[in-house]
Amino acid sequence: MMKLHSNQKCLIKYLETGCLETYLGMTYTEKINKMIYEGVEADEVLPKVAEKLAPQIHESLDSFIKSLEKDDTFRPHGELLHSFSLNDEGCTRKFEVYKADMTYKGFKEYHQRLQTFILWYIDAANFIDIDDDRWHYFNMFEKYHTADGTVRYATIGYATVYQYYAYPHHTRPRIAQVLILPPFQNMGLGAHLLHAIYREYMGRNQVKDITVEDPSVTFQRLRDYVDAVNCNTLPSFSREYLLQGFNKAMATEAKEKFKINKKQARRIYEILRLRATDLGNEQEYREYRLDVKRRLNIPYRREQNDLKKLECALQNIDKRSNITLPTLEQRMQTLEKEYRSLEEEYKKVIKRLEDAEEL
């Protein structure tokens, strides 16, 4: 059973670990009357939270306790895609990833309960339109046994993927939401979930590539790690070719084998080239920095050209019009800062790659 509560420890939310039956209640030591209090009308907190949760929440703790029996018979909805085990302090733990949609009986109600977690853990998150059949749902569970030998499943996290159209007769899956619940984070489970999603689409000819909707820094790092693991197996990403620069073969092979788009393939090339670069060799390291900075400078050069065109057009109208462009020195300083920030991110991915290889 999972428990969520506010920092003030007055709003309480219990959920069964498997089927996610939900109890919402509140405890307090004092209640303000509905009359205006210091110029502000008191809110009814519980109804405002309840309207965001699944429609069938338990308002009675006794009713919730009775529903706990449902977890004994709960089984994940959908098709089993991936199962794996992890060693956690000498204990083997088993996990499974399922793909489902709204045609599975009971899944709609389950997902409505599951999606409420994003309101607690993801800033500015919104619910998706579950009536749109272009959504695909990937759910992760821990499979375990109770003391009496009963097989049970605990909800670990989930991801949603939307099937966008890509001309002329392709689709472009876009990963929209990914959440691993806090008690299960930093265990490598997010990488397993992403691997399962990739495997679902990699063998499909109609899938053009896989994209991500507005990824957070944390998720981008996870995506980089998974893509780097995959691309590291490709001949075009061998050290010999990495040191020669990004090429068309890398973009093509990454797309054909792992549905990685060109922009992400270039980023993975930079990560793997940094790993392959001898940082003690000044010439080799310098060539790497210049290669990345040239790529970072492309948007700036386009912006400069646009500003110069705008300046010329304005001066034709009003000779006094003038646009101040950054100096070369200012641009070099900005570019160096961008590069250093990017290199630090890349090194975090590289460290995870190396740690994984040592296991």
Image: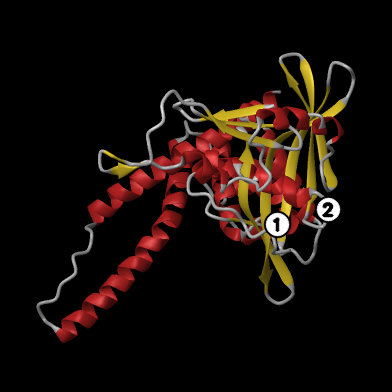
Looking at the image, which residue is at 62% across and 56% down? 128
Nearer to the camera, 4 or 79: 4
Tell which residue pokes out farthest to the top in this image: 90
Name the front one of labels 2 and 1. Answer: 2
At mark 1, the secondary structure is loop
In-image side of 274 versus 154 (left or right) = left
Looking at the image, which residue is at 73% across and 70% down? 170
The C terminus - image quarter: top right
At mark 2, the secondary structure is loop
* Percent position of residue 42, x then y: 37, 41
Give neighbour class at mark 1: few <14, some 14-19, many 20+ (Cα, 10 Å): many
Q: Which residue is mark 1?
A: 259
Q: Is residue 58 above or below residue 136?
A: above
Label 2, label 1: how far apart the Cα atoms are: 28 Å
Type of amino acid under label 1? Lys
Tell which residue pokes out farthest to the bottom in this image: 317
Type of amino acid under label 2? Tyr
Residue 104 marker: 2
In-image side of 232 versus 46 (left or right) = right
Residue 299 marker: none
Looking at the image, which residue is at 86% across and 34% down? 73
Check the image and tell me how it is coloured.
Answer: secondary structure
Tell which residue pokes out farthest to the left in this image: 320
Q: Is residue 68 above or below residue 289?
A: above
* Percent position of residue 67, x then y: 77, 32
* Percent position of residue 229, x then y: 68, 40
Q: Do tag 2 and tag 1 residues touch (Cβ < 8 Å)?
A: no
Q: Earlier in the sequence, mark 2 or mark 1?
A: 2
Numbered disc total: 2
Give neighbour class at mark 2: few <14, some 14-19, many 20+ (Cα, 10 Å): few
